[in-house]
Amino acid sequence: MTQKEIAAMNEIGQVPSTADVLGRRAVAFDRLVEEYRALAEMIRLQEDEKKQLGEKLMAHLADSEAKTLMSGELRVTIAQNPGRSSLSKELLLEHGVSAQVIAASTVAGKPYQYIVVSEPKAKK
């Protein structure tokens, strides 16, 4: 499939198949996609389990005055993160900072690419 054909499909909201675009490499690509999806799901489940275990540990530590305990050779500590602070453009404007200064002082993050594997969009 040519770049023009792919662009035309995108224009009308169609997504080409791996076989149409990658040819013989489609089987290997599809296998990698399935491995990626399965690993992402496994990580999600493990993160959920980790969160639940952390909540149980916090509940045990909440019963004591100690913020740090030794569990065998492992040090277990209740850590706190105050959260990320950020500037509100609206509040800066309300406090007299000009829109030009705000615009000149705004820095864009570094762009990056990543893979998203998802279920197909529902047809309208």
Image (cartoon, helix red, strand yellow):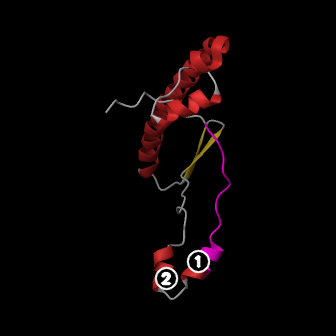
As for residue 109 lying within the magenta part, the answer is yes
Please provide percent x and percent y for residue 98: 55, 85
Please provide percent x and percent y for residue 96: 51, 89
* Amino acid type, callout 1: Ile
Residue at screen point 43% across, 37% down: 52
Please provide percent x and percent y for residue 95: 49, 87
Which label is found at residue 33? none
Q: Which secondary structure type mostly characterizes the magenta part of the structure?
A: loop
Query: Measured along the vertical axis of the image, is residue 112 above or below residue 28?
Result: below
- The boundaries of the magenta stretch are 101-114
Residue at screen point 61% across, 81% down: 101
Residue at screen point 64% across, 18% down: 22
Residue under numbered circle 1: 102
Position of residue 77 in the picture relative to residue 13 (left or right): right
* Amino acid type, callout 2: Leu
Of 29 and 22, the residue lying toward us: 22
Secondary structure of the residue carrying tag 1 is: helix
Which label is found at residue 93? 2
- Asked if the residue at tag 2 contacts the one at tag 1, i.e. Cβ–Cβ closer than 8 Å, the answer is yes
How crowded pointer 2 is (Cα within 10 Å; few <14, some 14-19, many 20+) is rated as few
Of 72 and 49, the residue lying toward us: 49
- Please state, as top left, top right, bottom left or bottom right, where the N terminus lies in the image: top right
Please provide percent x and percent y for residue 35: 58, 19
Of 29 and 2, the residue lying toward us: 2
Secondary structure of the residue carrying tag 2 is: helix
Query: Measured along the vertical axis of the image, is residue 94 above or below residue 112?
Result: below
Q: CA distance from mark 1 to mark 2?
A: 8 Å
Residue 86 figure quarter: bottom right
